[in-house]
């Protein structure tokens, strides 16, 4: 109930003050998948949320859950804490269980928000999860959100266009002929290239 209410409120806010376009709907996952968006704005997680008709599970940095008020709403929005080291491994194990239950998981492969809006080097966790779970990765390119609410700004600008583009899924089975380390390296490179390509094509 709270998930639906919060999602509806944010969607109304976006529709009133911004122009939102969602592309690549034919690539939107409907079953166990990992959505991998670029990350440059505070707006990114809720934008991904409202771009998809199915409830999504997010992994957010552990420090956000220290505030009891914020933690309550994050959990209602199916967000799960993730930390460094062993905590990160536990989060990946939890994500794998969610995928096994046919849920859709959102992981930001850069690991943090970009300072200038450009794509940062991707971390291997997302492809490791895909290769272990056999769930495809769906690249998602978010554009316009950085210009509205970049890192370092306290409040968003009003007005502007936001575009979310779902890319073609990366099937982990296509890398099964490679040794595990090579498979992860190649899949990570393909994911980065997919996100970069969508960014250039929609500018």
Image (cartoon, rainbow, N blue to C red):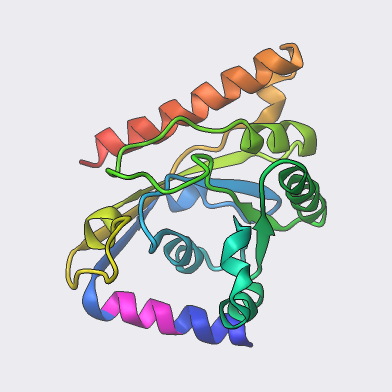
Question: Could you tell me which residue is drawn at 36 percent across and 82 percent down?
Answer: 12
Closer to the camera, 34 or 128? Answer: 128
Q: Is residue 133 above or below residue 63?
A: above
Residue 194, image x, y percentages: 43, 31
Q: Is residue 7 above or below residue 82?
A: below
Answer with the quarter of the image where residue 185 lies: top right
Closer to the camera, 39 or 155? Answer: 155
Q: Is residue 4 left or right of residue 146?
A: right
Point out the residue furthest to the left here: 159
Residue 53, image x, y percentages: 54, 68
Residue 125, image x, y percentages: 65, 36
Question: What is the total number of numbered labels drawn onto the structure image?
Answer: 0
Let me know if residue 54 appears in the view.
no
Which segment is the magenta one? 9-15
Prevalent SS, magenta region: helix
Question: Could you tell me which residue is drawn at 42 percent across and 26 percent down?
Answer: 193
């Amino acid at each position: 109930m709270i998930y639906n209410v919060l999602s509806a409120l944010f969607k109304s806010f976006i529709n009133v003050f911004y122009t939102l376009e969602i592309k690549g709907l034919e690539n939107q996952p409907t079953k166990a998948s990992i959505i991998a968006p670029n990350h440059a704005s505070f707006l990114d997680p809720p934008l991904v949320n409202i771009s998809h008709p199915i409830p999504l599970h997010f992994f957010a940095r552990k420090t956000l859950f220290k505030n009891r008020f914020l933690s309550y709403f994050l959990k209602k929005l199916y967000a799960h804490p993730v930390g460094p080291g062993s905590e990160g491994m536990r989060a990946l194990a939890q994500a794998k269980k969610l995928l096994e239950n046919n849920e859709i998981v959102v992981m930001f492969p850069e690991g943090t928000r970009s300072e200038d809006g450009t794509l940062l080097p991707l971390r291997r966790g997302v492809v490791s999860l895909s290769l272990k779970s056999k769930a495809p990765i769906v690249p998602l390119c978010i554009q316009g959100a950085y210009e509205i609410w970049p890192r370092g700004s306290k409040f968003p600008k009003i007005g502007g266009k936001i575009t979310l583009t779902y890319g073609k899924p990366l099937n982990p089975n296509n890398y099964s002929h490679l040794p595990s380390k090579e498979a992860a390296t190649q899949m990570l490179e393909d994911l980065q290239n997919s996100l970069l390509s969508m960014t250039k094509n929609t500018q």
